[in-house]
């Protein structure tokens, strides 16, 4: 399947955005992504690798209601914006389906989960107001940091920073004292 959707090669963009919301009264979350591309799985299916970061809002919101929107902008070439809106699911490293998805992404450290989306709406707009941006380089600081972390370090980080969301929703599941089944 080609990553070219409605005039934007979604898989070659250096950055895309993911938006979620848990419910009325909770926070709306928008997150820039860019270490790995969004991968187009089919006409209405996309996925990306979720890395550990400062929060766990996307995971928490998807587990609550599944609502998600992706936005890919053409930062070079013909201006265009493509949005995927639909239902997302978190695929944990312990899930047998992850092996199939992992084959689509480069080998990277610190994979917290993979986010997979079935889009019920794919739309595009002109993007005439989006500036053309010259890509400088990948921001790979996370890779360098993750290579120095052990599984125990990651388990402790998830327990400390990724167990609940800022709205108190469940995030990354953390198990008992030995953390052997963390994800």
Image (spheres, grey):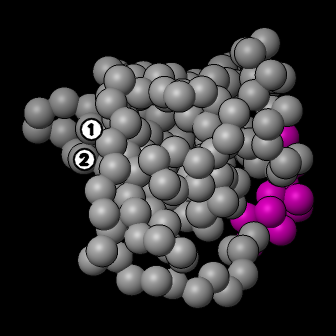
The residue drawn where x is 88% and y is 47% is 107
Q: Which mark is residue 28?
A: 2
The question of residue 163 being in magenta is answered with no
The reply, left or right, for residue 87 in relation to residue 91 is: left
Which secondary structure, mark 2?
Answer: strand
Asked if 131 appears above or below 111 in the picture, the reply is below
The reply, left or right, for residue 65 in relation to residue 109 is: left
Q: Which residue is mark 1?
A: 21
Residue 175, image quadrant: top right
Where residue 90 sits in the image (x, y, percent)? 56, 26
Q: Which residues are magenta?
A: 141-152
Where residue 150 sits in the image (x, y, percent)? 87, 48
Residue situated in front as seen by the camera: 5 or 182: 5
Residue 145, image quadrant: bottom right
Check whether the beta carbons of the residues at disc 2 and disc 1 lie within 8 A of each other. Answer: yes
Tell which residue pokes out farthest to the top in this image: 96
Mark 1: give few (<14), some (14-19) or many (20+) Cα within 10 Å: many
């Amino acid at each position: 399947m080609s990553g070219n959707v409605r005039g934007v090669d979604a898989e070659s963009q250096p950055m895309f955005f993911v938006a979620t919301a848990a419910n009325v009264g909770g926070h709306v979350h928008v997150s820039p992504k860019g270490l790995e591309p969004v991968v187009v799985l089919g006409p209405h299916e996309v996925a990306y690798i979720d890395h550990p970061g400062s929060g766990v809002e996307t995971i928490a919101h998807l587990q609550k209601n599944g609502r998600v929107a992706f936005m890919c902008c053409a930062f070079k070439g013909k201006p265009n914006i493509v949005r995927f809106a639909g239902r997302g699911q978190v695929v944990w490293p312990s899930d047998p389906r992850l092996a199939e998805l992992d084959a689509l992404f480069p080998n990277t450290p610190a994979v917290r989960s993979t986010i997979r989306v079935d889009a019920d709406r794919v739309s595009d707009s002109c993007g005439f107001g989006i500036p053309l941006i010259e890509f400088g380089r990948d921001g790979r600081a996370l890779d360098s940091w993750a290579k120095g972390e052990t599984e125990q370090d990651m388990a402790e980080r998830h327990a400390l920073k990724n167990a609940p969301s800022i709205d108190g929703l469940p995030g990354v599941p953390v198990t008992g004292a030995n953390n052997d089944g963390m994800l």
